[in-house]
Amino acid sequence: MQQEKHLEGVGALKRRHVGVWGVVFMIYCLVAAGAFGIEEMIPISGPGLTLLMLVLFPIFWALPISEMVAELGAVLPSEGGAYVWTRDALGEMWGWQVGFWGTISTWLQQAMYVVLVVGYVEKFWHMSPMTATILKVAMIVIFSAVNLMGIKEVSSLSTIFSLLVIVGFAAVMIVGFANWNTSPIEPFYNEEEGVVGSLGGSICIAIWMYSGYECMSNVAGELENPQAIPKGLIIAMPIIALSYLLPTMAGLASVGNWELWNTEGENAIGYMDVLIQFVGPAAGMGFLIIAILSNCSIFNAYIASGSRGFFVMADDHLFPRFLCRVSKKRGVPALSIIIMAVFTIFLCKFDFVTLAMATTPPMLYLYMCLAVAVHRLRKVYPLEERKKLGLYYIPFGKAGLYAMTICPFIIAGIALYVNGTDYFISGFLMLAISLVGYLICKWVYGGMAKEDPIGHPLNPKTKLAQGDTVYIGAYVALAGFVALLGSVLLKWYEGSWGEEYYLEEYGSGFFSDFWGMINWCRIGGIVLLVVGLVIFFIGRKKDPTLPIRQQPIPTEGLGVSLKKEFRDKA
């Protein structure tokens, strides 16, 4: 019986040595693995605006997110990352939402990269539908097997893939700059779209290109020194930013034709064409192999990240318990990895656009919650204690803290409304599923009160965590406010062309009716806002939230060297 217990939960995971550079390359794979995807931005925004966004987004989006994740990961280097941070900051209900959003988004993105790999292979090898399916399954099986071996093996493969991808894009940069023959910033924006249209059309692509910094923290509990993650984030962020900016500038300056840049289409231009035009077809073929390896590297790293989300939630009695089983030999969440592989095989039948549509909104909600969690955890785990332990935190006092949290919050909010009315409304389906999912899992599995009823008390009437009525009311009211505001902003942003566009895009059904969607946002927003406020104020009287209490920093996962240093100082 004791042995059975040892094989469940975070405590049964095997810690492996992964150095700082191993972490850097895993982060590189999770976030970037090359500049693929930026090709879509160029014809929408224009070359000048694209390059400007590649300069500004690292400063106002990627840097703040990496700083937030570095601080949160330093004080709570726990398996499960964003879920654990939000759980400790805002309670089980909000933690469950963030854990669910992040994990489902990762699972959906898994299938996206498998679809992209097969798409690249089909460019030089025509395949029947059956052959394409076999290739997809083979890819999923191979990289799932690597993940079943352990995080060390995932890191090693990520390092190899990252170096190959960096070499490939370095070649594009060198060849492109050596053959500079046109201005890479003219025209500055797409005059047909206008400034607003040019910016709105590509801001979501830029966000997607710079997302994933939080994913590495999902495996922090399996590293001998999880403080390597904050260090790795600081190193990886500028590498990723430069790997986007320099090859793109070099490509535009050498091959030009900005309006033809794309990832699909017979005459589409991309980074590969720089090498084909100035070096030869063989170099282009080599770069195509790099493109395939790029998506394989992302897929490999995302298995490691995505398979830990529900695993940690199950360990907290907030998901089916069988998901927290750990393999005895390798010390990895084997069952979670296998289930994720099966789920990915099923999702591969969908196209890239459909998967992307379901992925973006929950990720934006997640980043908003992380910004709030940073402030809350400053109160729970005082900064003075972190300084004593030598833990990383966002520098420059309160000014730095607010700058690093407000910027991504605002950008994520803007992205919700410029991503398309169809994507915007699809996000509400995820919000509804997530809330219902929490209620079911809390009632069925008991949550953290199962093992610590004093620290995580239940409300005897609702059978939910104390204060959940307040949190649920706020959740519903915020969803209503976002929908109501969307009815105004989306009407202004898409009103002149939305009716024709959505009718042509979908032909029939709910998403084909632009004004119907706007009305849904207006009416649904009012209903959700009213219902949420009623629940909130009832909760304030009947089910108040627990007060914020300062707690000692849990030193269990901080790393042996840091704990020893703290003991020596004491």
Image (cartoon, grey):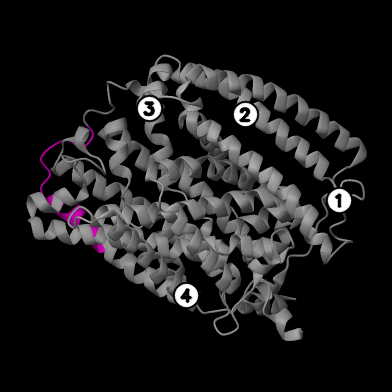
Q: Residues within 10 Å of mark 1 (few under 14, many from 20)?
A: some
Label 2 sits on a secondary structure element that is helix
Q: CA distance from mark 3 to mark 4?
A: 48 Å
Q: Residue at x 67, y 28 (%)?
A: 480
CB contact under 8 Å: marks 3 and 4: no
Q: Position of residue 455 (x, y in %)?
A: 85, 60
Q: Which residue is mark 4?
A: 19
Q: Which residue is mark 1?
A: 463
Q: Residues within 10 Å of mark 3 (few under 14, many from 20)?
A: few
Q: Which residue is mark 3?
A: 505
Q: Which residue is mark 2?
A: 482
Q: Is residue 181 magenta?
A: yes
Amino acid type of disc 1? Lys
Amino acid type of disc 3? Glu
Amino acid type of disc 4? Gly
Mark 2 or mark 4: whose residue is earlier in sequence: 4
- Stretch of the chain drawn in magenta: 167-185
Q: Position of residue 412 (x, y in %)?
A: 53, 37
In the picture, the disc for residue 410 is: none
Q: Residues within 10 Å of mark 2 (few under 14, many from 20)?
A: many
Tell us which disc is closer to us: 3 or 4: 3
